Amino acid sequence: MVAMDIYDILSESIMLLCMILFYHYIYMEPGFSGKRSLYLFSGSYLAVILGLKLIPDRPEWADFLCPVVFFCLYVLLIRKKKRIRGMFLFLPISGYLFMMVAASTAFYVVFTGARSSEGFTYAMDAVFCLVLLVFWRKGGRFRRRIKGEQGYRSLSRGERWLLNLGGIFIFVMAVIMIGIMENVQGYEIDSGWRILFLMTGSISIALLAVVMIAFVMQGSRKEYYQRESELRERYLKTELEHFKAYRQAQQEVRRIRHDMKNHYAVLSVLAEEEKNAEIRAYLAQLGEEVVRSEVGIQCGNDIADAIVNEKNRRAKEQGTVVEVEGRLPQDCGIDMLDICTIFSNALDNALEYLEGAQLPEKWIQIKMSGQGNMWLFQFENPVESKVVIQPTGTTGKADGGWHGFGVMNMERTAEKYMGHIRREIKEGVYCLEAVLFTTK
């Protein structure tokens, strides 16, 4: 294999990689769930492209076709629905990538007055490699942010049509520009008009591509932050309701204490008169007032108490018993919103399941334990037989567009603390385990 073949393999691999990156970060489509699948796909591509290079007198279009075919195969393996339609995304995506080549080549032709040279092609490939290297080394924060936004949103039909039609239009314009630059038959025009067309065409398609991509990504960020705002508002509302109930309970306690001397006097009189039945009735009534004045479950952490007690009131309405084991100190090293994310989503999922389940006993058990800088939270509840744990990000609810994010939010929170979320069903009990590592 000669050096030129190695260079061609590198160029074609860059083309496939750029198409996949565009597919993920612009079209917001998922990738392989595990590294094993990714390595198998990459190895298969290298094996095919190496074998292709060994074929003598192969057609020139075969080298360009190989990345396109593997991109279509990639989409076919990744997508869960509309796979055939998704394979045709190679056309608009190729348009956006082809735009960069056509626009840069047009500027080179205009300013040098010569056709594109091999040296310019090598320089462009070097720039592509440098950009990809920088994206890999310095773009971790950007990739994590985009990944987080992808968990909440997929492109609307209008946005997909905008990207698809824009990409196809840019592809056609880029082909025309290449034809004019290379003086292909049917595309010959005078030098003055040629320069004007190449300048305006390259600038126009570049601006069009940037505007459409920015429009789609801005819409994604807007909806992402809207969901984050709604989530924070929900947590703050829950905390406010808890502290209102806490304040009311404290007022009841103070009222009972204020009247305690009167209660003592009444009981003393009844005892002197040996009215035991009246004493028992009076104590029962007094006990009911004491029960109403209880402040609820105490975990040791204000925000955890707020969430648990708010969910406990809901659980009592549907006949579910909530039990708490362990304590979570106020200075545990976990942010309040992160505590809310874990507790609120775990308890919401458990309550929503138990509300419609046909079980003889309904209960939720919360276990909290810490050792060093590690915290372990376990949420258990009984389940019916033949229950299957759904994959992260999926839901069985009708309005699935606004559901299915609970476990996803918890996994993001666990990753923030270098931990993990584990779900399992064992002996008729569903267990969600969250492990977090703090700096304290």
Image (tube, rainbow, N blue to C red):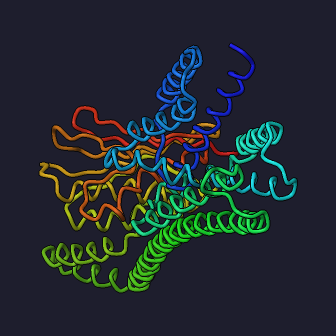
Q: Is residue 147 visible?
A: yes
Judge left or right: residue 424 versus residue 64. left
Q: Position of residue 189 (x, y in %)?
A: 70, 62
The quadrant of the picture occupied by the N terminus is top right
**Which residue occupies 74% across, 64% down?**
190
Residue found at x 83% / y 37%:
119
Is residue 325 rendered to the left or right of residue 236? left
Residue 412 position in % (x across, y down): 53, 50
Quarter of the view holding residue 107: bottom right
Q: Do we see residue 332 in this rendering?
A: no
Image height of 71 relative to 36, above or below: below
| Residue sitting nearer the eye, 163 or 136 | 163
Q: Is residue 289 left or right of residue 238?
A: left
Question: Does 276 appear above or below 394?
Answer: below
Against 233, residue 127 (above or below) is above
Between residues 371 and 14, which one lies in front from this camera angle? 14
Residue farthest toward the right in the current orientation of the protein: 112
Measuring from the top left, give residue 370's x and y in whole percent.
Answer: 56, 41
Which of these two is toward me, 63 or 419?
A: 63
| Image quadrant assignment for residue 2 | top right
Q: Residue at x 77, y 43 (%)?
A: 124
Q: How many marks?
A: 0
Viewer-nearest residue: 184 or 403: 184
